[in-house]
Image (cartoon, helix red, strand yellow):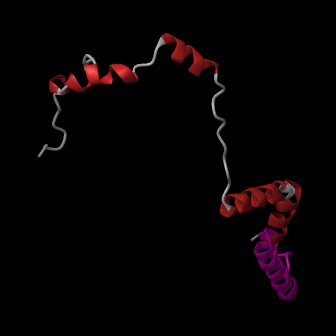
Amino acid sequence: MLEPNMAIDIKQVNTAVNTHIGKSPAHKGSEKTNDDAVNSLSTPPKSDSVSLTSQAQQLQSTQAKMNDIPEINEQKVQEIKLAIAEGRYKIDPEKLATNIAQFENDLKGMN
């Protein structure tokens, strides 16, 4: 077991795995000729394909919808902050409840 922060000597790593070993006579029949190599290069490569899961498609749709949401109106934010600080900001509980319910419904619609 290695001790924490103990250096490992990588010079003794077995490199025989990466050394070139001559082919045995049994493998000579399976060697490719230069003509085979040229023919394989002229063959068009297979194309890759990607398929998105339904969750990925949902996420993509949600991101697109979020891009349509307008930016924050900084002026309005500052006006509301000032009204709160001055005690002029009044909260309408019914309007707040309606807006929360609408927000919840909008979230459900994104799924």
Horizontal side of 86 relative to 3 (left or right) equals right
User: What residue range appears in magenta?
Assistant: 85-110
Residue 69 placement (x, y as % from top left): 85, 58
Query: In which image quadrant can residue 75 be found?
Result: bottom right
Horizontal side of 88 relative to 40 (left or right) equals right
Query: In which image quadrant can residue 90 be found?
Result: bottom right
Pick the front one: 70 or 59 = 59
Pick the front one: 32 or 93 = 32
14 shown above or below 110: above
Residue 21 within the magenta-colored segment of the rendering:
no
Q: Is residue 76 visible?
A: yes
Residue 12 placement (x, y as % from top left): 14, 25
Residue 101 within the magenta-colored segment of the rendering:
yes
102 shown above or below 25: below
Query: Which quarter shows the C terminus?
Result: bottom right
Predominant secondary structure, magenta span = helix
